[in-house]
Amino acid sequence: MDNQTDPLKTLSEIRSIMERSSRFISLSGLSGVFAGIFALLGALAAYVYLNLNITTPGYYEYAHNAGGEPNADFYKFFFTDAVLVLLASLAFGIILTMRKAKLKGQTIWDATAKRLIINLLIPLISGGIFCLILLSHGLIGLVAPATLIFYGLALLNASKYTLDDIRFLGIFEIILGLIASVYIGYGLLFWAFGFGILHIIYGIVMYYKYER
């Protein structure tokens, strides 16, 4: 029996080593949950700030005052809101990923992690620049859909260096962004669902699948 089980055990260990060397597997599912919660809080803050009902379309109409000039307070609020959501999500993501890597004795910053970050940043930076171009043309209603699409492309591009589940999240984000680009009046609602609800669902699935 030992002669049969030892080779299988050896193959399993080799496969595990190869997986660790080619894929970044220290991502924490809980980080996705927290990112989703922060996104929902950010969207809630936007609705409260604009004094809108969650089903009210045309949130972007508040970007300009009655005279057609840009509403500086609108842009300041949304910029601050987005930065706070991003920083909180990144902070919890880094802390929880480092915690998971430490518990499993894995290295968090290696060649695979660098490739993951690079492939993630290329679409994200491109999307950020594209969103600034949209803003410069006054097309603020397309900003929320564009962020979902480019974020989905970033996840799809980086998925080959981490867990396959990331690919499915990316595909759902892209589909949601395309739908949101049709119903631009509800872009904020789609944004909340994409960055909030989908992240929470993804995080819970990841946690129960890989961390329990």
Image (tube, rainbow, N blue to C red):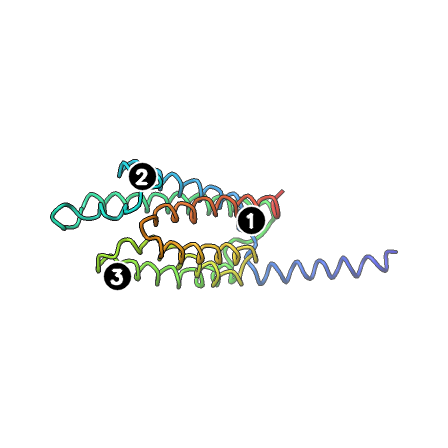
For this view, does 183 lie left or right of residue 204? Answer: left
Q: Earlier in the sequence, mark 1 or mark 2?
A: 2
Q: Is residue 139 above or below residue 43?
A: below
Type of amino acid at the residue the image marks with label 2: Tyr
Q: Nearer the viewer, residue 105 or 66?
A: 66
Between 87 and 139, the one nearer to me in the picture: 139
Q: Residue shown at 84%/59% (left/top)?
A: 4
Q: Pointer 2: what residue?
A: 47
Residue 70 drawn at (x, y percent) = 17, 50
Residue 20 position, x and y percent, is 60, 58
Residue 196: horizontal and vertical position, in percent?
A: 43, 44
Above or below: residue 203 compared with residue 125: above
User: Which image quarter is the C terminus in?
Assistant: top right
Count residues near mark 1 (Cα–Cα under 10 Å), then give few for <14, some for 14-19, many for 20+: some
Assign the N terminus to one quadrant of the image.
bottom right
- The residue singled out by tag 3 in the image is 133
Amino acid type of the residue that numbered disc 1 sits on in the rendered structure? Ala
Q: Nearer the viewer, mark 1 or mark 3?
A: 3
For the residues labelled 1 and 2, the Cα–Cα distance comes to: 37 Å
Spatial separation of the CA atoms under disc 1 and disc 3: 39 Å
Labelled pair 1, 2 in contact (Cβ < 8 Å)? no
- 161 vs 69: above or below: below
Residue 166 x %, y %? 52, 55
Residue under circle 1?
101
